[in-house]
Image (cartoon, rainbow, N blue to C red):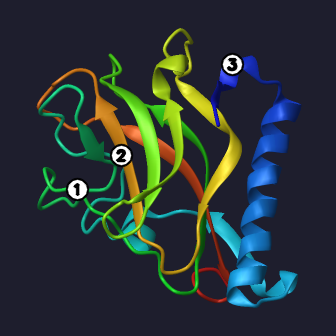
Amino acid sequence: MIIIPSEELTLTEKARLRAQARDAGIARAKKKLALGPNEITFRAGQNIQDFGTVGREQWLTQNLAAVNTQYSLWTTLAAPAVGLVPQLPNNRVAVFWGAAIGTVPNPVTLLAFRKGPTAGTSMAVFDLEWLEPFLVTMGYFDEPVWYDPQEFMSVVVTAKIATGAQAQVILYCDIAEPVGGTIS
C-alpha cells in the first residue's frame, strides 16, 4: 500500500479514491452490521465521539520525545503524552482514505495502522516523507484501511525529529453507521 501525494492526482482520480473508500465502508457496514443500503449513513470521523479523545477534537500525536519511536495519533487534552488505542463502538465501521501533515517541518516518517488491544496485527504502513517535496502535504491511500465494529485501533507515526511537542498528523476518515446514530 502506498500514499499518493494529492498534487500527483487529477480531480477525477481523487474522486475515484474517495468513492472507493466510501464503497468499501458501506460494503463492510452492510456485512458487519447486517444493514441495508438505505439504513447506513456515512460521515466524517470525529475524534471525541468515535476515537475517545476526551476534550480534543483535533488531530495531534503524543509528544515526540525520541527519534525512531512510535507515537499514537490519539491523545486526550488532559494527557497529551499518553497515547490511546480506541475501540470502535459496536455499530460503526471506520474507513481511512488519506493523511496530511500540518506540522512544519514534518517531524514524522512512517504512519502505521494496526489492530488489537496490544496493536499486534499490522494492517498498513505508509511513508509520509513521500509528501514532503510537494506544496500540499496531503496524500490519498491507494487502498482504504478500515476497522470493523469493536476492533481496537492503533494508529501510530514514527518520529524523525524529537521536538518534545505534539505533531499535527491529520487522518481522513469516514464512519459508516446506522441511520439515526449521529445523522438522521
**Of marks 3 and 2, the one in the foreground:** 2
Query: Marks 2 and 3: in contact by CB < 8 Å?
Result: no
In the rendered image, the quadrant that contains the N terminus is top right
Q: Position of residue 90 (x, y in %)?
A: 52, 86
Marker disc for residue 156: 2
Q: Percent from the top left, x then y, of residue 48?
A: 36, 68
Q: Secondary structure at mark 3?
A: helix
- Determine whether 81 is above or below 66 in the image: below
Q: Which mark is residue 83?
A: 1
Q: Are marks 2 and 1 in contact (CB under 8 Å)?
A: yes
Query: Along the horizontal axis of the image, is 137 left or right of 68?
Result: right
Element type at mark 2: strand
Amino acid, disc 3: Glu
Q: Tell me where residue 27 appears, x and y as whole percent.
A: 80, 71
Q: CA distance from mark 3 to mark 1?
A: 31 Å
Q: CA distance from mark 2 to mark 1?
A: 9 Å
